Amino acid sequence: EVQLVESGGNLAQPGRSLRLSCTASGFPFGDYAITWVRQAPGKGLEWVGFIRGEAYGGTTEYAASVKGRFSISRDDSKSIAYLQMNSLKTEDTAVYYCTREKTGLDYWGQGTLVTVSS
Amino acid sequence: DIQMTQSPSTLSASVGDRVTITCRASQSISVWLAWYQQTPGKAPNLLIYRASSLQSGVPSRFSGSGSGTEFTLTISSLQPDDFATYYCQQYSTFTWTFGQGTKVEIK
């Protein structure tokens, strides 16, 4: 069974950093791109970025709203993807989902809440 | 970035109704479009990929069509489980974008 489990969500002050983890199981992790999507309270979905699979060099792409502040990495030996979030802003407050990308985002984690507030 | 605009933002319908949601892209995305359903407190669920391909396990009352800049999601006969919010998402370029969502409410 394919599973994605996010962790690391917490309360952080503006300007601080937080790292989220996405632990995967039930599929060959290295073969898939992993995408992060967020949803602010009461709002719609926002694509954050993704990291390609090993076959595509594990390269990354980011939304303009997080480029230069967030970075995505992966450890295929542990089947974990990370979202490093630096210089956090109040508008980064959201539930963060990690997803598997095949043709569309076919599996999603349950999400982890990040609250940025002083 | 490519902008995705859904219409309507809210739709009131009854069980058994045929429902159509439209998604327009600010530039051509060929067929690189997906549709998702989200119920409150849950993660989204993939319904349609590549504009018209039904994801495994999704009921056949859901269908997608379109190419280029205009796309539709149709629910042929609305069921109680279908009252939810629906999002389109383009994956034509290296930066992906979602539509703002369409909430399907009970009439």
Image (spheres, rainbow, N blue to C red):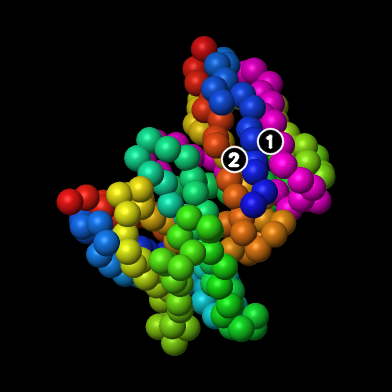
Query: Which residue was labeled with disc 1?
Result: B23
Relative side of B22 to A37, left or right: right
- Give the numbered dot on residue B97: none
Crowding at dot 1, Cα within 10 Å, few <14 / some 14-19 / many 20+, comes out as many
On whether residue B19 falls in the magenta region, the answer is: yes
Mark 2: amino acid: Gly
Taking the view exactly as shown, the residue that stands out farthest to the bottom is: A77
Residue drawn where x is 50% and y is 31% of the image: B84
What is the chain identity of the residue bearing mark 2?
A: B
Tell me residue B3's x, y (percent). 65, 43
Residue drawn where x is 44% and y is 87% of the image: A77
Q: At numbered mark 1, what does the secondary structure look like: helix, strand or loop?
A: strand
Q: Nearer the viewer, residue B82 or A82?
A: A82
Q: Quadrant of residue B41?
A: top left
Tell me residue B1's x, y (percent). 64, 52
Crowding at dot 2, Cα within 10 Å, few <14 / some 14-19 / many 20+, comes out as many
Taking the view exactly as shown, the residue that stands out farthest to the top is: B107
Q: At numbered mark 2, what does the secondary structure look like: helix, strand or loop?
A: loop
Q: Tell whether label 2 touches label 1 (CB within 8 Å).
A: yes
On whether residue B24 falls in the magenta region, the answer is: yes
Q: Is residue A15 visible?
A: yes
Residue drawn where x is 45% and y is 72% of the image: A72
What is the chain identity of the residue bearing mark 1?
A: B
Tell me residue B95's x, y (percent). 62, 59
Query: Which residue was labeled with disc 2?
Result: B99
**First in sequence: mark 1 or mark 2?**
1
What range is drawn magenta here?
Answer: B15-42
Mark 1: amino acid: Cys
